[in-house]
């Protein structure tokens, strides 16, 4: 544990309550590969506790420690795991969960931490190199830019450096790269669902809910979200989705592909295929191809996630419960929601009419924003903005973020790619030795982190990315020592 200030910026009027205390920030350290003079690799854990997988083994970090006789540290973010400044997370207590406070923790930690049995390892006299993936990937980039005199270099993997309000692009790689018979089936079913919803035919909508076993859900958006869980979001992921696909079978999940194979099953039983015709009277006689398969999968895989069968409850699939969201118990979901509501945004939403969508168009920014408003009512010292203050996220440079010796690694099939350095919304990227970058062909979310002990056995695009990262770090360390 490392004692850190709750408030690094007492003179900033934003932090009106001026908390003067400290909190204990948890970290794990690996020194078995260390030799005096070696670097420190700081892995940012991000939006979760570090009790289980510390990411210091079977990972790029392990290769870096071995190759360069370094120390590996995995650091828990404030407001996650046991690194919570307060016993609860009220709106006022969450005042100090901001990006600037989070990255200031990293700066102080690198300069002050004392490790038993190891001397002279603090930054900047020893080279500290950051690694973060996803939300921590953004933090790695923000920290390397802001505290470049402390951290010699950083790697931002799938780092969401761009904040925006609605993020329908999350579904674009799925639309483009998932099995297209499955994609087309979902697109067509979603179009028909939205036609049914817009018809204001309550009986027809109720019949649709019953087909999926979800007649208890009162809000149509909760229904739309629940049947979208195998695809992804919005915000919550109770099943493994496109985002959890990984080249490494030890860490990846194939649930998305199982979902698609079930939806497109050409040998489906008659009791599934018969359902495809149950709603044809509402769509001018047009068959709802694969609706029965889709509903059967939801009943078999998603509904058992609610053992009580009280599907409309806050503990299951009903989101329209203000008291549920307002529970101030410390937890990763609440902390991440606060960052989403105040700075980051990226509310997953459907594509507009006129474009193909994998989720119903009833899911828009207002759906998520309502959760924010319920979760974080105005306090004495703190209140959330009416929509996320994206400038607090984008102030570090947005798509123009650069810092010396900051390597951006992204995947072309990552659902978060369009918030990352290699976004289609960003300028064309080019490598330079001071500002390196690489887009992994066909890769998903943070695919460079998990490695094999034998790098040469990795799939070719992953293998060459691992080699690229190793030689980039080697170049950095040679420059540092010269």
Image (spheres, rainbow, N blue to C red):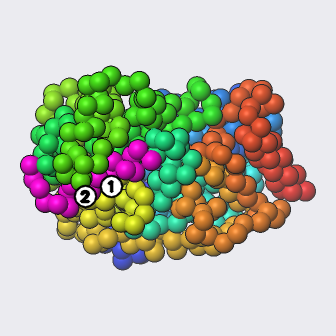
Q: Toward which corner of the image does residue 435 lie, by quadrant?
A: bottom right
Q: Secondary structure at mark 2?
A: helix
Dominant secondary structure (helix, strand or loop) of the stretch shown in magenta: helix
Mark 1 and mark 2 in contact? Answer it, CB < 8 Å. yes
Q: Nearer the viewer, residue 482 or 226?
A: 226
Q: Which percent across, then down, holds residue 223?
A: 22, 46
Q: CA distance from mark 1 to mark 2?
A: 6 Å
Quadrant where the C terminus sits is bottom right
Q: What residue did someone put label 1 on?
A: 191
Left or right: where 54 falls relative to 297 = right
Residue 265 circle label: none
Residue 2 is one of the magenta-drawn residues: no
As drawn, the residue found furthest toward the front would be: 285
Q: Nearer the viewer, residue 171 or 53?
A: 171
Q: Which percent across, then down, holds residue 405?
A: 75, 60
Q: What residue did someone put label 2 on?
A: 195
Q: Which percent across, then down, holds residue 172?
A: 50, 55
In the rendered image, the vertical position of residue 420 relative to residue 38, given as above or below: below
Q: Secondary structure at mark 1?
A: helix
What residue is rendered at 43% in x and 71% in y? 390
What residue is rendered at 35% in x and 37% in y? 290
In the rendered image, the vertical position of residue 180 relative to residue 426, given as above or below: above
Q: Nearer the viewer, residue 287 or 225?
A: 287
Left or right: where 208 falls relative to 32 = left
Left or right: where 367 falls relative to 164 = left
What residue is rendered at 33% in x and 55% in y? 191
Left or right: where 33 falls relative to 230 = right
In the rendered image, the vertical position of residue 111 relative to residue 460, given as above or below: below
Give the magenta range.
184-203
What residue is rendered at 58% in x and 25% in y? 250
């Amino acid at each position: 544990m490392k004692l850190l200030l709750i408030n690094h910026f007492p003179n900033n009027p934003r932090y009106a309550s001026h908390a003067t205390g400290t909190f204990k920030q948890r970290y794990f350290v690996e020194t078995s590969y260390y030799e005096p003079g070696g670097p420190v690799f700081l892995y940012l854990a991000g939006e979760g506790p570090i009790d289980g997988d510390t990411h210091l083994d079977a990972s790029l970090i392990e290769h870096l420690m071995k190759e360069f006789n370094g120390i590996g540290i995995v650091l828990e973010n404030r407001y996650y795991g046991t690194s919570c400044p307060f016993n609860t997370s009220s709106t006022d207590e969450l005042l100090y969960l901001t990006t600037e406070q989070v990255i200031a923790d990293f700066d102080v930690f690198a300069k002050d931490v004392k490790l038993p049995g190891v001397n002279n390892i603090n930054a900047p006299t020893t080279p500290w190199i950051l690694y973060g993936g996803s939300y921590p990937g953004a933090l790695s980039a923000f920290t390397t830019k802001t505290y470049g005199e402390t951290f010699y270099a950083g790697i931002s993997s799938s780092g969401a450096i761009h904040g925006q309000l609605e993020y329908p692009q999350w579904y674009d790689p799925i639309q483009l790269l998932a099995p297209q018979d499955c994609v087309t089936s979902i697109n067509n079913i979603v179009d028909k669902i939205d036609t049914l919803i817009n018809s204001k035919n309550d009986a027809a909508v109720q019949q649709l809910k019953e087909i999926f076993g979800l007649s208890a859900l009162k809000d149509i958006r909760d229904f739309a979200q629940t049947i979208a869980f195998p695809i992804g979001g919005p915000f919550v992921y109770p099943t493994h989705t496109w985002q959890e696909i990984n080249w490494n079978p030890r860490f990846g999940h194939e649930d998305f592909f199982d979902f698609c194979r079930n939806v497109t099953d050409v040998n489906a039983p008659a009791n599934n295929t018969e359902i495809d015709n149950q709603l044809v009277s509402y769509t001018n006689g047009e068959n709802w191809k694969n609706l029965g398969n889709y509903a059967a999968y939801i009943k078999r895989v998603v509904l058992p996630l609610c053992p009580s069968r009280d599907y409309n409850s806050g503990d299951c699939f009903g989101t329209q419960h203000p008291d549920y969201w307002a529970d101030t118990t410390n937890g990763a979901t609440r902390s991440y929601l606060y960052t989403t509501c105040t700075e980051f945004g990226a509310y997953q939403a459907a594509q507009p009419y006129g474009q193909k969508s994998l989720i119903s168009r009833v899911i828009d920014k207002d759906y998520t924003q309502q959760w924010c408003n319920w979760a974080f009512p105005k306090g004495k010292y703190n209140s959330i903005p009416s929509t996320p203050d994206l400038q607090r996220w984008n102030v570090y440079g947005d798509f123009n973020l650069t810092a010396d010796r900051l390597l951006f690694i992204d995947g072309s099939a990552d659902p978060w790619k369009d918030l990352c350095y290699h976004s289609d919304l960003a300028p064309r990227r080019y490598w330079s030795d001071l500002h390196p970058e690489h887009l992994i062909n066909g890769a998903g979310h943070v695919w460079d982190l998990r490695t094999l002990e034998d790098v040469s056995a990795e799939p070719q695009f992953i293998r060459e990315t691992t080699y690229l990262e190793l030689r980039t770090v080697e170049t950095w360390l040679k420059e540092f020592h010269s």
